[in-house]
Image (cartoon, rainbow, N blue to C red):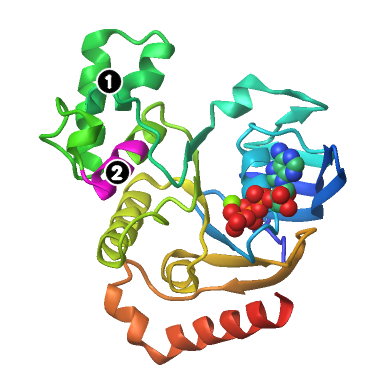
């Protein structure tokens, strides 16, 4: 289940990665020792019951939270040395959360280009890059607007553009479309597929939606209830680009049913 094509290093590699939180009420074992390897360019989706450790796992891969055990490698570099993380490895990572988390006092292009500003890129170069990115995510023409002037789906596109701004190899997304209505969510799933196919990035995405997981993923990893451990791994074979109508396909629905019944069994 963690096999790799020979000679090709995993883009993300976890060996026995574990998380225990110390809390005033005692220890919370969020994630059991986990082995996982994500291929370069893969779209991997994490599914699992609420509280099973999906966000915890994503935050550890994203360099936001130190594991309490195991070895975590990103693009061949050890990401964590105890509580210290490797700054160069973090450069390979971009994150998108459930809420777009744009800064309300910055324009859309200001938000998208912020990571570049923090990295010292010139203003002209930043604005050129922001324009390229707003086009990529389909919000060109809105560069000078404020976040509050955009719809939820457009704000989420801006957040994706921001995460891609410094060209990370890996995009980590935690329920990025969870706050959107069903139609906007469908549209965003298509958009994410397009952006992913265009950029060739490695994506790890967390969702609660079995249909979204099946639509987007090359591979779905279903986690058990806390402490999370890998319960089931499903390869999703459908050709790309996948149309939304795929969801009415018998083979698609068979995967959805299999995941749903397994999720019910373990929850
Ligand atoms: N900083 C923390 N301190 C203590 N416990 C934590 C902390 N962060 C998460 N936990 C606990 O770890 C477990 C896993 O949480 P996590 O947020 O990773 O779950 P999740 O799978 O993302 O859930 P959801 O689907 O609801 O987002 C939960 O029991 C949670 O309460
Ligand atoms: Mg979560």
Horizontally, residue 216 falls left or right of residue 236, namely left
Could you tell me if the residues under marks 2 and 1 are in contact, i.e. CB atoms within 8 Å? no
Q: Which tag, 2 or 1, sits closer to the chain's start?
A: 1
Q: Position of residue 113 (x, y in %)?
A: 31, 22
Horizontally, residue 12 falls left or right of residue 157, namely right
Horizontally, residue 135 falls left or right of residue 118, namely left
> What residue sits 62% from the left and 48% below the top?
55
Q: Position of residue 118 (x, y in %)?
A: 42, 12
Inspect this view and state whether residue 94 appears: yes
User: Given the current orientation, which residue lies at the most extreme front position?
Assistant: 25
Q: Position of residue 25 (x, y in %)?
A: 86, 43
> What residue sits 70% from the left and 31% below the top?
79
Q: Which residue is mark 1?
A: 106
Q: Quadrant of the C terminus?
A: bottom right
Looking at mark 1, is its residue's CB closer than 8 Å to ligand 2?
no
User: Given the current orientation, which residue lies at the most extreme right position?
Assistant: 26
Q: Is residue 30 magenta?
A: no
Q: Which mark is residue 193?
A: none
2 vs 1, front mark = 1
Q: Which residue is mark 2?
A: 157
Q: Quadrant of the N terminus?
A: bottom right
Is residue 90 positioned above or below 136 on the image?
above
> What residue sits 36% from the left and 88% below the top?
249
Q: In terms of depth relative to the viewer, which is nearer, 6 or 89?
A: 89
Inspect this view and state whether residue 38 appears: no
Q: Main secondary structure of the magenta part?
A: helix
Secondary element at image label 1 = loop
The magenta region covers 151-159
């Amino acid at each position: 289940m963690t096999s790799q094509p020979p000679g090709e290093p995993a883009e993300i590699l976890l060996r026995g990665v574990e998380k225990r939180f110390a809390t005033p009420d005692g220890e919370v074992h969020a994630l059991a020792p986990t082995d996982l390897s994500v291929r370069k360019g893969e779209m991997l989706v994490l599914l699992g019951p609420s509280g099973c450790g999906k966000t915890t796992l994503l935050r550890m891969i994203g360099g936001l939270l130190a594991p309490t055990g195991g070895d975590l490698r990103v693009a061949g570099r050890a990401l964590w040395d105890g509580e210290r993380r490797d700054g160069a490895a973090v450069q390979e990572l971009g994150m998108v959360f459930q809420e777009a988390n744009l800064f309300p006092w910055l324009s859309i292009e200001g938000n998208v280009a912020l990571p570049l500003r923090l990295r010292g890129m010139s203003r002209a170069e930043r604005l050129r890059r922001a324009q390229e990115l707003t086009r990529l995510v389909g919000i060109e023409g809105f560069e000078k607007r404020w976040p509050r002037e955009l719809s939820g789906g457009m704000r989420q596109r801006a957040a994706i553009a921001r995460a891609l701004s410094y060209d990370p190899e890996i995009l980590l997304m935690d329920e990025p479309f969870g706050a959107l209505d069903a139609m906007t969510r469908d549209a965003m799933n298509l958009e994410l597929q397009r952006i992913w196919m265009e950029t060739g990035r490695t994506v790890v995405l967390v969702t609660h939606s079995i249909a979204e997981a099946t639509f987007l993923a090359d591979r779905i990893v279903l986690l058990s209830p806390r402490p999370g451990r890998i319960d089931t791994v499903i390869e999703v074979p459908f050709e790309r680009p996948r149309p939304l109508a795929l969801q009415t396909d018998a083979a698609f629905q068979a995967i959805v049913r299999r995941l749903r019944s397994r999720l019910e069994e373990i929850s």
